Every structure is written in structure tokens, then in C-alpha cells.
Image: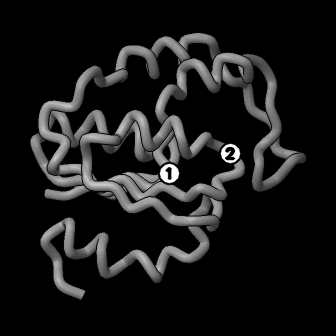
Amino acid sequence: MAIVGSSLGGFYATWLAERRACRAVLINPAVDPARDLARHIGEQSSWHDPAERFFFEPYFVDELRALEVGDLLQPERLLAVIATGDEVLDWREMHSRYATCHLRIVQGSDHALSDFEQHLPAILTHLGLHA
């Protein structure tokens, strides 16, 4: 079993990889989503369709807090791919959080890691898969 997660998915992948002792690749992972999303409680518009509305509940933040992982028990199982050009999350905070893991610091790029295909060989190698 292996996991790949991006942004909030990277936060979830960290939690799952710690519990299942499996390999994971974290792409621009959220470090503290409870902190970051707490300011968005209330009615929001969908990023992909601003006409679509939803309500972000306070208990969602509590659920994120409950999933926080302390010190990483097996950091060698994790590869963090971190773009210095991430416009959503601070790459330095990601770097600090995952400093004991395998790191791939990407100069520039963006939160979506638009140059993903360039990193695919390293990702597959980390996951024990062949390109």
C-alpha cells in the first residue's frame, strides 16, 4: 500500500501513512490545516464554481485537529515534494515539518505542482514502483 496526497490530501496521507506504516508522497502538504481553515468558518463559495455555495462548519476544524500527527515515527517512508513557488502554503513551514523525511525541494513551480510529470520518476522510485 502506498499513498499520494496533495495539499490537504498530504495532511491526510501523513496521518494514514503513520497509522498503516506505509510509504507516502506528500505534494505541497498542508502542515496545520485546522489553524489555516479556522478563519473560513461560515458560508463559502466553491473555488471551481463561485456560484456554488457551501457552509464550512466549526466542527470540521475540530476534526482536523484530531488528525494532527506529532513527531513522525518513520520519516524515511515519506517523500515530501515542496515547491518554493507555492502561492497557497508556505514552503518553509512544509520544509520544517518534513525535514526528517526524504525531501524534493522544487525551485519555483506552484501549489498545483504544474510540472508534476518532471517529478514522477522520483515519486515512483520512492513508492517502489517502476516507470
Q: Residues within 10 Å of mark 1 (few under 14, many from 20)?
A: many
Q: Is residue 75 left or right of residue 39?
A: left
Which residue occupies 52% across, 47% down? 7
Tags 2 and 1 touching, CB below 8 Å = yes
CA gap between label 2 and label 1 equals 9 Å
Q: Is residue 121 left or right of residue 54?
A: left
Which residue occupies 45% across, 60% down? 105
- Which one is in front, 66 or 126? 126
Image location (x, y in percent) of residue 43: 80, 24
Judged from the image, the secondary structure of the residue bearing numbered disc 2 is loop
- Which one is in front, 116 or 96? 96
Q: Is residue 77 left or right of residue 83?
A: left
Q: Residues within 10 Å of mark 2 (few under 14, many from 20)?
A: few
Q: Amino acid at mark 1?
A: Asn
Which residue occupies 22% across, 31% down? 72
Q: Give the residue at mark 2.
A: 88
Quarter-of-image position of residue 60? top right
In the picture, which quadrant includes the N terminus?
A: bottom left
Q: Give the residue at mark 1.
A: 28
Q: Amino acid at mark 2?
A: Val
Quarter-of-image position of residue 2? bottom left
Quarter-of-image position of residue 63? top left
